[in-house]
């Protein structure tokens, strides 16, 4: 499959891809999973369904931290053209899905299991609607943690798993991991779980390519401009509740979750990743390869940053081709 070139990326996305996606899309809201021992009304998750002719399967996308559905327009287009239905849910605290805080910049959650239960609820709806088709997972960063845990909890759900720069362990800047864990636990115990993690700030539209997770200026610019105009995707910061949730997801994946996976895994590692631990990703893959119940193909992507789907044309071509080969 020939990917869209950077030279005329914006024009093709606007004139061809966006109308195509709009014509094949339906949107809905799915009520989130019931949280044990909680009486509040369940929130609703915003979900986009894209359908293609003569589908070979359904790909459900689990997006990353502070991302919205629009970031995956290009990948969704390729999946549709390759013959797959696509389900694009927005996780709690993101996009048009329900939130536990009124601050549009803040991603806050009370328990990491809420992310997984909600995602599984959407997967069950997808499985019921397309019962005759295999279900595949495409998951990035935070969504990689959520999707992988979902696959560990329900091992028969996905036929194949694609992990792109998964958050097996988040990077914590210059703060040691053990110190980060202690800070998150203390802040949450003190009732400050809905406050901004120190160093985080509200969205101000100042992100630039050089400090972003993308390599391609064309791909970065398109989503960045959409984001500036869309308040619902201007999430930009983590609460201490989210930080503790990411720590607990990391613990689960590294010490328990990997043992339970049974579906074949294709795992991509970016060369220059400033958001998740490459060492943790490598260890996770080696555990699957040596002691796991399934296979794990490890792909190192030179020249890429955290968002491999935001890379230059050559990297994108190799990335998309490898994913489609794996799905076949």
Image (cartoon, helix red, strand yellow):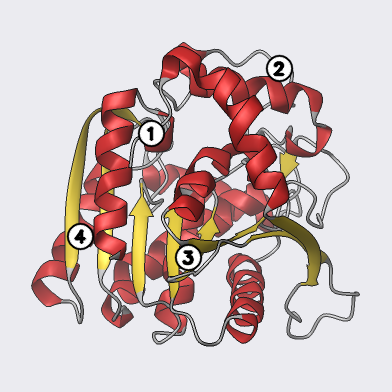
- Mark 1: secondary structure: loop
The disc placed on residue 147 is 3
Alpha carbon distance from label 3 to label 1: 26 Å
Q: Label 1 crowding class (10 Å Cα cut-off): few <14, some 14-19, many 20+?
A: some
Residue occupying image coordinates x 31% and y 55%: 324
Residue identifier under label 4: 285
Question: Residue 68 is drawn in which quadrant?
Answer: top right
Using the image as rendered, state which of residue 308 and residue 247 is in the foreground.
308
Alpha carbon distance from label 2 to label 3: 29 Å
Q: Label 4 crowding class (10 Å Cα cut-off): few <14, some 14-19, many 20+?
A: many
Instruction: Give the mark, 2 or 4, whose residue is nearer the N terminus.
Output: 2
* Position of 210 relative to 264 (above/below): above
Question: Residue 228 is drawn in which quadrant?
Answer: top right
Instruction: Give the mark, 2 or 3, whose residue is nearer the N terminus.
Output: 3
- Label tally: 4
Instruction: Give the mark, 2 or 1, whose residue is nearer the N terminus.
Output: 1
Residue 289 falls left or right of residue 255? left
């Amino acid at each position: 499959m020939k990917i869209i070139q950077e030279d005329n990326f914006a024009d093709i996305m606007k004139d061809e891809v966006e109308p195509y996606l709009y014509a094949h899309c339906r949107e809905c809201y799915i009520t989130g999973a019931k949280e044990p021992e909680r009486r509040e009304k369940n929130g609703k998750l915003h979900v986009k369904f894209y359908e293609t002719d003569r589908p070979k399967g359904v790909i459900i996308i689990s997006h990353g931290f502070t991302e919205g559905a629009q970031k995956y327009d290009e990948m969704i287009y390729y999946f549709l053209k390759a013959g797959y239905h696509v389900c694009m849910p927005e996780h709690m605290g993101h996009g048009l899905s329900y939130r536990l805080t009124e601050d549009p910049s803040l991603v806050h959650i009370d328990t990491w299991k809420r992310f997984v239960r909600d995602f599984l609820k959407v997967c069950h709806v997808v499985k019921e609607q397309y019962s005759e088709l295999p279900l595949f997972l495409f998951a990035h960063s935070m969504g990689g943690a959520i999707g992988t845990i979902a696959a560990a909890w329900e091992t028969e759900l996905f036929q194949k798993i694609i992990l792109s720069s998964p958050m097996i362990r988040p990077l914590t800047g210059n703060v040691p991991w053990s110190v980060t864990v202690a800070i998150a636990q203390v802040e949450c115990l003190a009732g400050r779980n809905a406050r901004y993690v120190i160093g985080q700030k509200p969205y101000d539209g100042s992100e630039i390519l050089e400090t972003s997770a993308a390599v391609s200026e064309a791909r970065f610019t398109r989503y960045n401009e959409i984001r500036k105009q869309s308040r619902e995707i201007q999430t930009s910061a983590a609460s201490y509740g989210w930080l503790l949730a990411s720590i607990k997801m990391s613990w689960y994946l590294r010490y328990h979750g990997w043992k339970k996976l049974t579906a074949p895994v294709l795992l991509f590692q970016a060369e220059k990743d400033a958001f998740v631990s490459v060492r943790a990703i490598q260890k996770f893959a080696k555990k699957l390869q040596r002691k796991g119940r399934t296979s794990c193909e490890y792909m190192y992507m030179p020249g890429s940053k955290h968002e491999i789907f935001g890379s230059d044309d050559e990297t994108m071509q190799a990335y998309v081709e490898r994913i489609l080969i794996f799905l076949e």
